[in-house]
Amino acid sequence: MKTRAAVAVGAGKPLEIMEVDLDGPREGEVLVEIKATGICHTDEFTLSGADPEGIFPAILGHEGAGVVVDVGKGVTSVKKGDHVIPLYTPECRQCPSCLSRKTNLCTAIRATQGQGLMPDGTSRFSIGKDKIFHYMGCSTFSNFTVLPEIAVAKVDPAAPFDKICYIGCGVTTGIGAVINTAKVEEGATAAVFGLGGIGLNVIQGLKLAGADMIIGVDVNDDKKTWGERFGMTHFVNPKKVDNVVTEIVNMTKRGADQIGGADYTFDCTGNVTVMRQALECSHRGWGQSIVIGVAGAGQEISTRPFQLVTGRSWRGTAFGGARGRTDVPKIVDWYMDGKIQIDPMITHTLKLEDINKGFDLMHEGKSIRSVVVY
Ligand code: NAD
Ligand code: AHE
Ligand code: ZN
């Protein structure tokens, strides 16, 4: 079949809207009509050329929602008409990682996914004889896409596509980092670096978990009001203080010994200097710092080992530690029940033709989430 898609033709180049060829689903695969997709900073990261796994031409996008329109041989868990959210972290429930119960990082199809291919090592997308690569196993910047059955979560058909697409990455990543990865407890203190599409969901998750003090950190002062809307109690602009680490340590001093530091810190910027700051303002003895941000090729993190010797932990999380087929339908239900907010974070709704505007708005710090509706 033919489908309309925004194609990433090369690093740093605007996406090009094209009609592309799409082969139907093979064994264990499903064809999904994408109804809406968010634009995540990771799409921008890959488009910029900073992603070591970046490959062109490709159809980016990994934050979608849509309807199953066809299924390949042997598919049992979804059927035509089901509403689904594509999963860049699938859940096969059979690989050693899934069976370990220690991680959400299913390994069933990770190798081919990283090469922009379907599990059988081929691409379903092309223009004539020229192959176009998949992206993160999702390619939601195409109106129709093919996914392995294990990489879709079946969700409530009453849920609006243009909102729940955000659960395909940002919402789940932010809230999951708090609940699944850090396992934040009631009364905790926390600092969140970077109040964009991910950081605001970390704040929302901290509020849900019952954290007392939620410090938001952003170089953009406009993010103060945004953070406050979702439960942030304090704001720091690192450009306006001498030393952001000292500032947060001082703000969180408590107890007889007056040792400061947040119980939990989260990097939602992808900046390795910020990752170090987040670690170093976590509490001596028990502070946990969670890396969510994705850093470019060649970037490395560093700190004095003493920071770890004295009890801080540096950890990371992908897709908020969520097991997609199990957890994503529940998060959709939380949204439908009013337990979490999504609508106010979707600041812009665009047509596919205007998708590059979504990237511009992100660069300018003017959007939280832009969503493309097909
Ligand atoms: P975004 O562009 O919406 O937000 C980034 C925010 O960081 C902005 O508000 C910006 O002003 C702020 N910022 C930039 N430099 C800063 C600094 N030095 N100090 C403090 N704040 C700073 O991006 P997003 O969509 O929220 O994504 C955030 C990061 O998370 C990206 O690196 C993205 O690739 C990554 N990500 C990771 C996962 C995962 O599973 N680990 C999932 C989604 C996104
Ligand atoms: N391809 C990059 C890494 C990109 C990355 O870390 N991706 C996150 C999801 S970001 C979603 O917005 C992730 O899930 N990572 C785990 C995985 O298996 O990809 C690189 O550095 O090579
Ligand atoms: Zn993402």
Image (cartoon, helix red, strand yellow):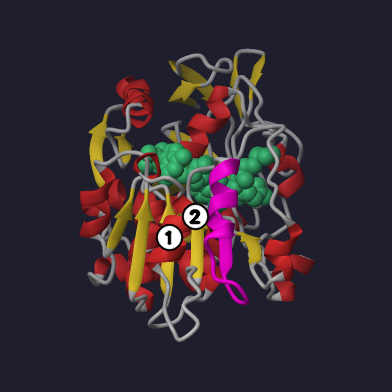
Q: Decide: marks 1, 2 in contact (CB < 8 A)?
A: yes
User: 40 or 335, which is in the foreground?
Assistant: 40
Q: Which residues are magenta?
A: 272-292
Q: Residue at x 26, y 65 (%)?
A: 231
**Mark 2 Cα-neighbour bin, 10 Å: few <14, some 14–19, many ≥20:** many
Q: On screen, 249 above or below 268?
A: below
**Mark 1 Cα-neighbour bin, 10 Å: few <14, some 14–19, many ≥20:** many
Does the magenta-highlighted stretch encompass residue 273?
A: yes
Identify residue type, mark 1. Answer: Ile
Residue 287 % position (x, y): 57, 71
Which residue is labeled 2 in the image? 245
Whether the residue carrying mark 2 lies under 8 Å from ligand 1 is answered with: no
Question: In the picture provided, is 310 more to the left or to the right than 1?
Answer: right
Please tell me in which quadrant of the rendered image residue 228 appears: bottom left
Q: How many numbered marks have been drawn onto this rendered protein structure?
A: 2
Label 1: state its secondary structure: helix
Q: Residue at x 72, y 50 (%)?
A: 109
Residue 40 % position (x, y): 44, 40
Q: Residue at x 46, y 78 (%)?
A: 258
Q: Residue 248: which numbered mark, if any?
A: 1
Question: In the picture provided, is 282 more to the left or to the right than 124?
Answer: left
Residue 110 % position (x, y): 72, 48
User: 20 or 188, which is in the foreground?
Assistant: 188
Does the magenta-highlighted stretch encompass residue 244?
A: no
Identify residue type, mark 2. Answer: Val
